[in-house]
Every structure is written in structure tokens, then in C-alpha cells.
Amino acid sequence: QVQLVESGGGLVQAGGSLRLSCAATGTIFRIYAMRWYRQNPGQERELVATITTSGSTNYADSVKGRFTISRDNAKNTVDLQMNSLKPEDTAVYYCNVALRTFARDLDAWGQGTLVTVSS
């Protein structure tokens, strides 16, 4: 059974920084792309950042230059470093990992971690 465990959310003032972490555990044969999404109540889930197996990254325009996604393939982890946070970054953040177990391909989701940025 595969699980994604997130950590690092919390309350921060505008202009501050937070680092989110997500660890994939279980019987994993291979991990493909790793992503961070965010969502507010009543809104669609928004793709924030993607990192491929080769380390290529892509970001939503709203976070470019402020957020950095990184991965550790040896530890099956993906992090999101968030700097210069703004109140509009407030959301529940979810990690998403495309992976392969020995039985099948799987699109796994973390439980979500709340980030609150106060003005």
C-alpha cells in the first residue's frame, strides 16, 4: 500500500517562508512526475508546481520566482520551498505523485496540509 505523508504547513505572515515536504512510502517500483497542488473551498484545485524524473520544473505564473520544487529520488520525497508568501497563497496544499508499484501505475495524493498567510 502506498501512502503520501505531507508536513510543513502552518501560519506565516506575508513575506515569510514555509517549506512543505511529502514522503512516499510503501512498495514503490518507480516514481514519475511529482507535483504540488493547492485548493481553497469552493474553488478548483490549482496546479502549483511540477518536477519530472529528470528534474525539469514548471510553475504556475502566480508562484514563479517565489516557490521552488525539488525532489530526492533516493528518499522518494518532494519538497516545496515557498518564499515571499502572500495572503493569496493561503490554501490547502496537496502533493501528487505518479508512480508504479509492482502491480500497476498509480496516481497518489497526500492528505493535504493547510498554509495560512496573514496580511
Image (tube, rainbow, N blue to C red):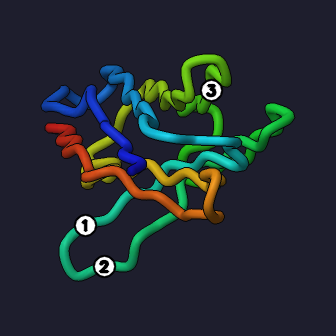
Decide: few, some or many residues near mark 1? Use Cα within 10 Å; few <14, some 14-19, many ≥20. Answer: some
Task: Answer yes or no: is residue 60 visible.
Answer: no
Image position, residue 66 (x, y; %): 55, 31
Image position, residue 10 (x, y; %): 16, 31
Decide: few, some or many residues near mark 3? Use Cα within 10 Å; few <14, some 14-19, many ≥20. Answer: many
Q: Name the element at disc 1.
A: loop
Image position, residue 52 (x, y; %): 77, 43
The residue that label 2 is drawn on is 43
Q: Nearer the viewer, residue 56 or 6?
A: 6
Q: In the drawing, does residue 44 fall left or right of residue 54?
A: left
Q: Nearer the viewer, residue 11 or 74?
A: 74
Q: Which mark identifies residue 70?
A: 3
User: What amino acid type should be assigned to the residue bearing mark 2?
Assistant: Gln
Q: Are marks 2 and 1 in contact (CB under 8 Å)?
A: yes
Which quarter shows the C terminus? top left
User: What amino acid type should be assigned to the residue bearing mark 3?
Assistant: Ser
**Is label 3 or label 2 in front?**
3
Q: Which badge, 1 or 3, comes first in the chain's sequence?
A: 1
Decide: few, some or many residues near mark 2? Use Cα within 10 Å; few <14, some 14-19, many ≥20. Answer: few
Image-quadrant location for residue 15 = top left
The residue under the point 19% across, 45% down is 114
The residue that label 1 is drawn on is 40
Image position, residue 82 (x, y; %): 44, 29
Q: In the drawing, does residue 12 fall left or right of residue 8?
A: left
In the depicted structure, whether residue 112 falls above or below residue 28: below
Give the alpha-carbon distance from disc 1 to disc 3, as whole Å: 24 Å
Q: Name the element at disc 2.
A: loop
The residue under the point 55% across, 51% down is 97
